[in-house]
Amino acid sequence: MSRIAPRFGKLRTEGRAGLVTFTMAGDPDYATSLAILKGLPAAGVDVIEIGMPFSDPMADGPAIQAAGMRALKTGMTLRRVLDLVGEFRKTDGETPIVLMGYFNPIYRFGPERFAAAAAKAGVDGLIVVDLPPEEDDELRPHAAAAGIDIIRLATPTTDAARLGPVLAGASGFLYYVSVLGVTGTRTAAADDVAAALGRIRRASDIPVAVGFGIKTPAQAAAIARVADAAVVGSALVQVIADRLTPDGKPQPGTVDAALAFARELAGGVRGARANAPAGA
Amino acid sequence: MSTPNSYRSGPDEHGHFGIFGGRYVAETLMPLVLEVERAYAAAGADSAFQRELDYYLEHYVGRPSPLWFAERLTDHLGGAKIWFKRDELNHTGAHKINSCMGQILLARRMGKRRIIAETGAGQHGVATATVCALFGLPCTIYMGATDIERQAPNVFRMKLLGAEVKPVTAGAATLKDAMNDALRDWVANVDTTYYLIGTVAGPHPFPAMVRDFQSVIGREARTQIMKAEGRPPDRLVACIGGGSNAIGLFHPFLDDPGVAMDAVEAAGLGLDTGKHAASLAGGKPGVLHGNRTYLLQDDDGQIAEAHSISAGLDYPGIGPEHAWLHDVERVNYVSATDAEALGAFKLCARLEGILPALEPAHALAHVARIAPKLPRDHLIVMNLCGRGDKDVFAVAGHLGVKL
């Protein structure tokens, strides 16, 4: 079994939502991204998402597109992403790691071989953006055999007819994409998110993480009041980008800036339900 | 691989041609892709839709396009008898409008109020902007910044037609990057917007739908060659980027065993240089832009940049049905270089008084290669799918002429 279900179980016991962060593997380079990853759990991050860079990230906005290009420029590959996870696992055996990306690099690697290698490296879940339920048969059985969760996506366009099939193959958690659009652009209204979560929870008790467009600790807190976890990606990636030299190299303080922002987000998420009535 | 009973029965209900095709899109788009599929199936079953499309194709596009016996070219090459299917005479100067007309009528049926499209050479952008002007729908065209530079006349045409042309600077700033941005726009505007895809690529049902709309080319060609020669052709030839003009000509003939088919990929500076756009000759199966097909890519699955003198062929993938027809060996996929295409461009101008677009100039280069070795009663129909007016500036540049 992956580390994801135990982690959400623990969060439930603690009576709080989790913070999920996204950073791109190899952004701005291998060593810096590893240093950031290693610092995230102590900064209060509950689940770590790592981007697998791809040349054509159709569902991503400018911030994550640029992060992927920086990573590819330094020679990042899918094999190196797994190396990164393996190195992280030397110091942290608890924090769930979810890889997020697009199908083609996995397809080239070979889905079965990839699932086995990812499990060995210490990966707990996979989000493959362009692999909808209609197409994920070629990955899901291999992931399941390797003990890796396939994290399914639901969106505002996922209607009642689709929600059933989407949930049927979901494991670990459900990733609710709260807005129509690419990553890091629009921000959803908390009321709309709450309504969507109500529909999902009537159909399943799988934990739900909400992402896309969450940029500040306050926004993360608002989501944490209604969801099982809040996902912050583009805003964190942008904090890293803002600390780079014009040619994309890290500077002293890049890692600290990223971790400081993660701590602020964690503060928002952890304080979110402090004043809320029990059970809300 | 076993031989299927028919080469014309694909795709299956999931949009697969063998292992190719499919619907590899983000969940946000899935309901919309399914909606397009339902709407297209309903339109296909509605004779009023076909009548409406036929009306516009005849009176606005100018169909049927002629089938022209290229007599001087035939004499010059001294072998096979060469016929041109003259889709360059369509309104807007290429075959692209066949599918644009079908899709805009579908978008209207679906109640969509805004159209987006990607374009490489600008032909599909112009055709899309044209049908949007005709029906009064706002239109945004995504175009790579590199392509905007090398296809300036088409950019201006689109603007004259009322389209907004959005430059795309990501990647190499060419067709694949424009398609990425169009998909991003679609994800953000699913309720109002129809994505009018320009070739037989993208998620199901687009490859099948665009093929169906382009198949008017092959249906007409069959009628015309039967009238002119009393028999089907021996060989069909078409250039191939995404592959919409080729499949349009080929599809109605796929089950005619006597009809050979050659599709000509862009070999750019040469297949061995790495600077080409020949996805079948130099690519491997992969997943991009909603479907599985042959793609130019590295060992890590990162998509490579294509290169071709022709912006319309400058794409690292190919339609999934072509990937399948390649693997089942029904269609013969060959290539022609930039230099060969330029040579054919000049030859056609001098001998036939026709400036072909650089895209079909690749097809013509192949015809010029094979025709001399074929008997005089060997009938070739080549799809002259676009006219070369748009390429005059680029060709001048390549020939070292300052305009």
Image (cartoon, coloured by chain):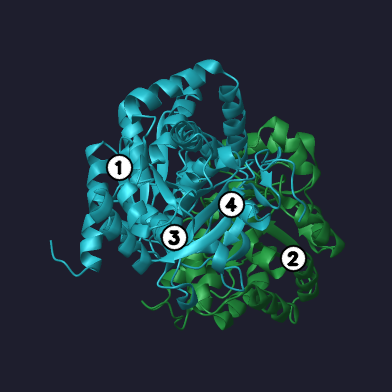
Chain colours: A green, B cyan
**Disc count in the image?**
4
Mark 4 vs 1: CB contact within 8 A = no
Instruction: Please indicate, yes or no, whether residue B83 appears anywhere in the rendered image.
Output: yes
Residues indicated by labels 1 and 2 sit on the same polypeptide chain: no
Q: Residue at x 56, y 23 (%)?
A: B43
Q: Earlier in the sequence, mark 3 or mark 1?
A: 1
Discs 2/4, front: 4
Discs 3/1, front: 3
Instruction: Report, in whole angstroms, how far the alpha carbon at label 2 lies from the one at label 4.
Output: 42 Å
Give the residue type at disc 4: His
Give the residue type at disc 2: Pro
Residues indicated by labels 2 and 4 sit on the same polypeptide chain: no
Instruction: Report, in whole angstroms, how far the alpha carbon at label 3 lies from the one at label 1.
Output: 37 Å
Residue on which the image places disc 1: B164
Q: Earlier in the sequence, mark 4 or mark 3?
A: 4
Residue on which the image places disc 2: A96
Residue on which the image places disc 4: B322
Q: In which quadrant is the N terminus of chain B drawn?
A: bottom right
Residue B250 or residue B373, whichever sits in front:
B373
Residue A91 or residue B16, whichever sits in front:
B16
Instruction: Report, in whole angstroms, how far the alpha carbon at label 3 lies from the one at label 2.
Output: 56 Å
Residues indicated by labels 3 and 2 sit on the same polypeptide chain: no
Q: Residue at x 29, y 59 (%)?
A: B347
Query: Where does residue B131 sit, x and y in percent of width and height?
Result: 35, 31
Q: Chain of mark 1?
A: B
Q: Chain of mark 3?
A: B
Give the residue type at disc 3: His
